[in-house]
Image (spheres, grey):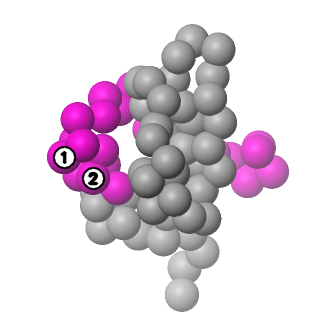
């Protein structure tokens, strides 16, 4: 099985406790500009699209989606 790509998704605003709990396995970090960085392994495109769909359904504005280079955490 192919290794999962680590991806950093930047979303506008702060995430509530229920969503934070649902993002188990991801590292969340609030930024100084009012955004939240969500970083974690994405094993395939379906997982990425599912996560982006979840943010859209919840009205969370996705600012950017970027791969994290290995060793670049």
Image location (x, y in percent) of residue 53: 23, 51
For this orientation, the residue located farthest to the bottom is: 1
Rendered view: 51 above or below 2: above
Q: Which of the numbered marks, if any, corresponds to residue 54?
A: 2
Residue lying furthest left = 57
Residue 35, percent from left and from top: 51, 23
Residue 64 in sight from this viewpoint: no
Residue found 53% across the figure and 17% down from its top:
34
Q: Residues within 10 Å of mark 1 (few under 14, many from 20)?
A: few
- The image position of residue 19, as x and y in percent, is 43, 51
**Element under label 2?**
helix
**Are discs 2 and 1 less than 8 Å apart at CB?**
yes
**Residue depicted at x 19% and y 46%:** 57
All told, the count of numbered labels is 2
Q: Which mark is residue 11?
A: none
> Is residue 73 at least partly visible in the picture?
yes
Residue 3, x across and y down, in percent: 60, 74
Q: Which residue is mark 1?
A: 57
Q: Quadrant of residue 26?
A: bottom right
Report the side of 43 relative to 54 (left or right): right
Q: Which residue is the extreme one toward the right? A: 71
- Please state the extent of the stretch shown in magenta in the rendering: 51-73
44 above or below 6?
A: below
Asked if residue 29 lies left or right of residue 60, the reply is right
The quadrant the C terminus occupies is: top right
| Residue 52 relative to residue 20: left or right | left
Camera-side residue: 29 or 72? 29
Residue at image position (43%, 53%) is 18
| Magenta region includes residue 61 | yes
Inspect the magenta stretch and tell me whether residue 49 lies in it.
Answer: no
């Amino acid at each position: 099985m192919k290794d999962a790509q680590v991806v950093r998704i930047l979303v506008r605003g702060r995430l509530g406790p229920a969503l934070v709990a649902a993002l188990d396995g991801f590292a969340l970090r609030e930024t100084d500009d009012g955004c939240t960085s969500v970083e974690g392994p994405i094993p395939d495109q379906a997982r990425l699209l599912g996560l982006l769909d979840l943010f859209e359904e919840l009205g969370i504005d996705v600012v950017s989606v970027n791969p994290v280079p290995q060793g670049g955490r």
